[in-house]
Structure formats: structure tokens, C-alpha cells
Amino acid sequence: MTVLRTLNLVRIYQNGGVPVPAVRGVDFTVAAGEFVAIMGPSGSGKSTLVHMLGGLDVRTSGEIWLDGKRVDTLSESAWAVLRRRKIGFVFQFYNLVTNMTVADNVELPALLAGMSPREARERREYLLGELGLTERAYAAPAELSGGEQQRVALARALANGPQLLLADEPTGNLDSRNTRDVLKLLGEVHGQGQTIVVVTHDAKVASKADRVVTLADGMIVDDASMRRRRFTPGTAGDVVELRG
Amino acid sequence: MRLPLLALLAKEPAHGYELKQALEQTFGSAYPSPNIGQIYVTLGRLEKDGLVRSVDVEQSNRPNKKVYFLTADGREALENWVDEPTEGPRVRDEFFMKLVLAPLTGIADRMALINRQRRHYLSLMRDLTELAERTDPGDRVALLLIEGATLHLQADLDWLERCQEDLVT
């Protein structure tokens, strides 16, 4: 089943009257349960693409279909409703609501999506538990480290049980340990059937995906399905040769 | 394996089997488990070069064992090794040769080469990621080694992107 589909998607910015094409005709399909990584040099249009997929940027031409419905023609307020119910978004810089506790940050999207307060609380407890943040539930975002804030942002994005999780460089700002925690949860929710589209520079993130789509100059130049190889090495000693 | 053995002997004299165990304990799964025969061959060469010496130690009910210790020359060789900067891994020049030459001969175009190489690096990255997940979190040495390999691979991928930006238009 197809969750997301774009047809000849184009985004052209105007820079002082000069048209600057950022995305130049992207045809792209994501099946339910698929984990897709989008890579490419900076300026290749990958962020613009994922922002359009979440309704955070407006396409110049082309079509976006989400869950069988055309969405690129929606008004801003209709997009807001759609995001509440069907899309989770994680950014490089967490964007948490600073004057709300961690728990409220995570519960809010669940409540907005129509869950009862009890369901929202249970969902929040589950997600924070999975991310090792149970004890931080009543802290303010500012009291958390960057890595913890990003984990909260991920919990928040998953709170409404979104059909589609979109992420823009979710580990761009994290050290290797926090990256590992974020990757672990992404792997877990993907295992539970979560559809994920993530823009990333980080090959560790991409290596978790089922598919890696590479953009250059606003166009798809490679679409590689990452089949699991039969050979998997046994220990670090087999992968890395120490000389001396 | 010469210099790691010298380093272990700088700590204390030891016989071959103790050195094998010390290597395993120090490097954990990061070091391909050394073969005891290889260790004895290396010790023999080090002795011939005057970097270690051995004494026979009597054991009850068993043949004598040879205990090796470091000589002054051995210590000097070890100090030189530690003091000199270490050659970093080289750029993957073979791929770069292909990238530069193949289009000239019409054998392949650059985008296809870059895409194939990227897929290869990503699948290596997947192996490393899985390996890191399988490695005992207490095995710091192995995890650091894997992280080093991961960072090199990330650099290779970044460089591939630069090649793509500059050579493919």
C-alpha cells in the first residue's frame, strides 16, 4: 500500500526576481511501513522536499498524495489538521515548547489528534520510557541536554501515532551516544510498522533505512533499496584490521 | 604484531601464551584472535634482532617454558614507534582513478560509478551499525574501533558527494 506519492514535484524560490529551482520534478513513492532515507549534498533540495511533504513549504507545481488523498492543494489550516492527525515531524533543532514540561510537550500532539487524556498519558509514558526519559517527564526542556531534547522531540513526533514520520537531519546536532538512542527508537518503531522518511547526512541513519534516495540539483539521481547482505561479519576484528 | 608484543613485554616479562591472552584481554573483539604459532614466530624474530631475550624457566612436571623480556634496543624500538606520527589511511585512490578515467574511455559514466560506490559504502555502514549493536557495551576498545571505521566511512561518503558536485554536472 502506498502512503505517500509525489508527481513531478517542483519548488522554485524567487531570489530578488531570479527564479531559483530547489526541487526540479521529483516522482517519489513510499510504501506503508517503509523506512526511506533521503541523502544528497547541501543545496540538493532534500530539506525543501521533506518540508513540502509535511506541508511546511508550498510546492510550485506537481502533486503530493498522502494516504490516497491529494494534499498539495490543501489550505494552510487543512494542512495543520492533517499534520495533527497523520504526520509526525522531527527537526534538527528540537523546537520544543519551552514553557511546558517534557510530558506536556509529548502529550499535546496526542490530545490535538483527538486522543483522550488517559490515552495521551499512556502513550507519553510508553514513548518516554522507550527513550529512557521517564525520570525527566516533569522537567522543562531547557533543563535537558541537547540529546535528551531531541529524544523528546522524537517522542512528541510519534505521540499521535502518525501514519508518516518525517525527519529533517534528526541527528545533525547529536553526539554518537544520543545518535545511537535516536537510531534505536527509529529502528524499533520501524519494526512496529512505522513509515519513516528521513533527510540525513549521517550514513549511520541511512544505513538503518530500507531505501536510500539520493538527490542532486533538485532531482533524484539514485534510488537504492538496501537489501540485507547475507554475509554479516562476526566481530570488530573481522571488519577492521589493526596493523602493527 | 611485533610492536604490540614489545609493548606488552615493556609492562612485564611473559611467555608466549601469556602474551596471547594479554592481547585478547586488551583488544577484546577488536583484534582478530592471534594465533599462538604466529606469536612464537614473531618472538623468535624479535629475539634474533636483539629486541627481546628469553630465559628458560623450569616447571615441575612440564617442559621448561621460555619467558621473554625486553632489551634496551627493544625499549628504544618501542619508544620510536610510539613517538613517531602514524600514517593515516589513504584516500581510496583506486576508486578515484576509475572516476577520473572511466568516462574518458566511455566504459562508464561518473554518476553511475558514484552511485555504485555510495551503495557499497552504505552497505558497509550497515554492517558496522549491526556490528556495533551486537558488540558488548563493555567492550570499549572494540566500540571505539568500530566508531573510527564509521567516521572514516562517513568521510568517504562526504567526499563522494564532493566528487559528485564537482565532476558531474
Image (cartoon, rainbow, N blue to C red):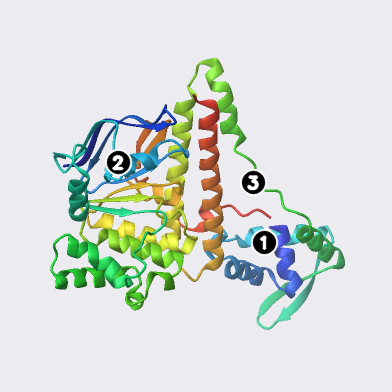
Separation (CA) of disc 2 from disc 1: 61 Å
- Whether labels 3 and 2 belong to a single chain: the reply is no
Residue ranking furthest to the bottom? B60
- Whether labels 2 and 1 belong to a single chain: the reply is no
Report the side of B20 relative to A155 (left or right): right
Q: Quadrant of the N terminus of chain A?
A: top left
The disc at residue A170 is none
- Circle 2 SS class: helix
What residue is disc 2 on?
Answer: A52
Q: Quadrant of residue A211?
A: top left
Report the side of B161 relative to A87 (left or right): right
Separation (CA) of disc 1 from disc 3: 26 Å
The disc at residue B39 is 1
Kind of residue at badge 2: Met
Kind of residue at badge 1: Ile
Separation (CA) of disc 3 from disc 2: 41 Å
Q: Is residue A135 above or below residue B52?
A: below
Residue B39 on image: x %, y %: 67, 61
Q: Are circles 3 and 2 on residues that touch, CB within 8 Å?
A: no
* Residue appearing at x 62%, y 55% in the figure: A242
The disc at residue B89 is 3
Q: Are circles 2 and 1 on residues that touch, CB within 8 Å?
A: no
Q: Taking the image as drawn, is residue B136 in sight? A: no
Residue A2 on image: x %, y %: 18, 41
- Circle 3 SS class: loop
Residue B111 on image: x %, y %: 46, 27
Report the side of B40 relative to B101 (left or right): right
Foreground pick, A40 / A100: A100
Mark 1 belongs to chain? B
Q: Nearer the viewer, mark 3 or mark 2?
A: 2
Mark 3 belongs to chain? B
Residue A172 on image: x %, y %: 46, 53
